[in-house]
Image: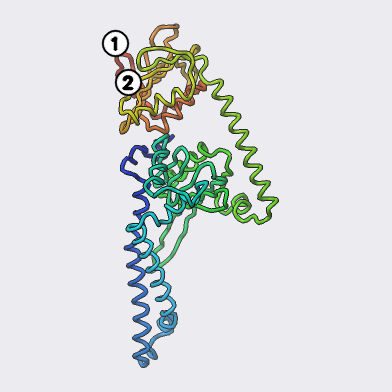
Amino acid sequence: MLQQEQTQRSDKLEEGYCLRRTRERSGDLALAIIFLLVGGIFLAFFFMGRALPEEVARLDDKTLLAYRFSPFLGACAAALGLFLASRSLRDALFPEKSALAQSIRDQLPYPDEAPPLNELCAMVDQHLRQNGLWCGAMGIGKEWVLGDAVSCIPRIRGVFSREERRTSHSGGRTRVTCIYEVWIVDDRRQRQVTSLRSRQELEAAMNGLRRRAPAAVFGVYDSKDYKDLVYEKDEMRRHAQEQAYEQRKAMQDERKRREREALAQNQVLTLPDGSVTSRVTWDVIHELLFGPSRTGQPNAFQLVPGVSFYGQGRAFSRLACIPGGARGLTRILIEEYSGAPGAPGQYAWTRDVDAGEAEDVLRGWLRGAVPPLEHWTRMERAGRTWQAVERR
C-alpha cells in the first residue's frame, strides 16, 4: 500500500521543488572541501618527503608505499574536490546551467528553443502536482519524473532497480552499505539514476513507474534486459526494440480505452451540488478528486453501484469521498451493504489517504474492486454520523 511505500503528497511543491532541486547540489560543497583537504594532505606529505629525503628513508614499507602513491592520490582527490566544488557553485549560483536543467531541455522536442529555466521547472512542477506520487527523493508526475535527474515519461523505454549490499572491513570493524537506485533508460539510451534511502522507497518508485510507463521494460540493473536496451549497437535490433515498445504501448492504450468505456456504467454518481448522474467516466472522477487542489474548495461526492461489490469477505454498497484540497489528505468511506436495497448500512470503513492512493482506490472501485482494509478504520453508524469501532 502506498502508505507503506512512504510516499509524500505532491502539494509540497508549491514553492517550486524542481527549481530547488537544481540548488541542492550545493550540499556537495562540504564533500568537495573534504576531498580538497585530503588531496592537500597527500600532496603536502609528498613535498615534505622531497624536502626531507633522510626521513623518507626511515619509513616502513607500508608508509613508503603510501608516500610513493601520494602525489597521484592527492592529485585525484584535489581534482575531484575541484569538480564537486565547481558543480555545486554552478548549480547554486547559475541553476539555468545545471545538469538537471539541461536534462529537461534535452528531452524536449526542440531543445534549442526551450523556454527559460523558471518556465521549465514550472512545467515539471505542474505535472508533479497532477497525480504526483512521491517516493523519497523521486517524484512521479503525470508526464515527468523528478529525481537526481529529470525523465520525460513518454520517452521512458526501460526502468531497472538496483539493490546491492556492500561489506567493507576496516580497523577490526565491519561496515555494511546498502545501495538503492532506480535506473531509467530513455529512447536515446540515456540513463537517469536516482538514489533512494530504503527498499520500501525503491519498491514504491518501481510500482509508481509501472503505472505511469506500463509499456517500458522493467527489470533489474545489469540484467540481460538492461544490457540489451543500453548497449545494443545494431540498428536493426534497436529498431526492433522500438517496434516492440510501440506494440506494447498500443496494447496498453487499447486496454485503457476499453476500461474507460466500461467504467462504472452501472453506478450512480452524486455530485457535490446534490445532482446525480449515471454517466460516470474517469475524467469526471479525476476532476472531482484533483480539482480542489487548484480551487482550494474540496467538495464531497459519492458513488453507488447498482449491484453491491464483494471483496475482503464483505459486500459494499457505497463509496463517499471528500477530496483533501491543496494540503489535506483525501478521506474515503466505503459503506457495507445492509442486506436490503435502499437501506443504509450499519458499518463502514474509512481512511485518510494521499492523492496517489485515492486515485488507486477510486479506479479500483470503478472496476468493482475493493481495496485491502488492513489499515482502514471500521465505523459504526450512530444516527446520521459514524463512530469508530474499537478493535478487540
Asked if 8 appears above or below 30 in the picture, the reply is: above
Indicate which label's residue lies in the foreground, 2 or 1: 1
Q: Residue under label 2, please give it.
A: 389
- Residue 245 in view, yes or no: yes
Residue at 33 percent across and 72 percent down: it is 37
Residue 322: give x, y in percent of width and height: 35, 23
| Quarter the C terminus occupies | top left
Give the distance between the C-alpha atoms of the residues marked 2 and 1, in whole angstroms: 15 Å
Give the number of the disc on residue 383: 1
Q: Amino acid at mark 1?
A: Gly
Give the number of the disc on residue 161: none
Label 2: how many Cα within 10 Å (few below 14, some 14–19, many 20+): some
Looking at the image, is mark 2 or mark 1 earlier in the sequence?
A: 1
| Quarter the N terminus occupies | top left
Residue 24: give x, y in percent of width and height: 34, 54
Color scheme of the displayed model: rainbow
- Residue 161 in view, yes or no: no
Q: Nearer the viewer, residue 266 or 202?
A: 266
Q: Nearer the viewer, residue 121 or 238?
A: 121
Residue at 48 percent across and 47 percent down: it is 151
Q: Nearer the viewer, residue 188 or 97?
A: 97
Tell me if 129 is positioned left or right of 229 in this view.
left
Which residue is at the far right?
236
Q: Amino acid at mark 2?
A: Val
Residue at 41 percent across and 62 percent down: it is 174
Asked if 331 appears above or below 9 in the picture, the reply is: above
Which residue is at the far front?
113
Residue at 49 percent across and 21 percent down: it is 281
Q: Nearer the viewer, residue 96 or 206?
A: 96
Label 1: how many Cα within 10 Å (few below 14, some 14–19, many 20+): few
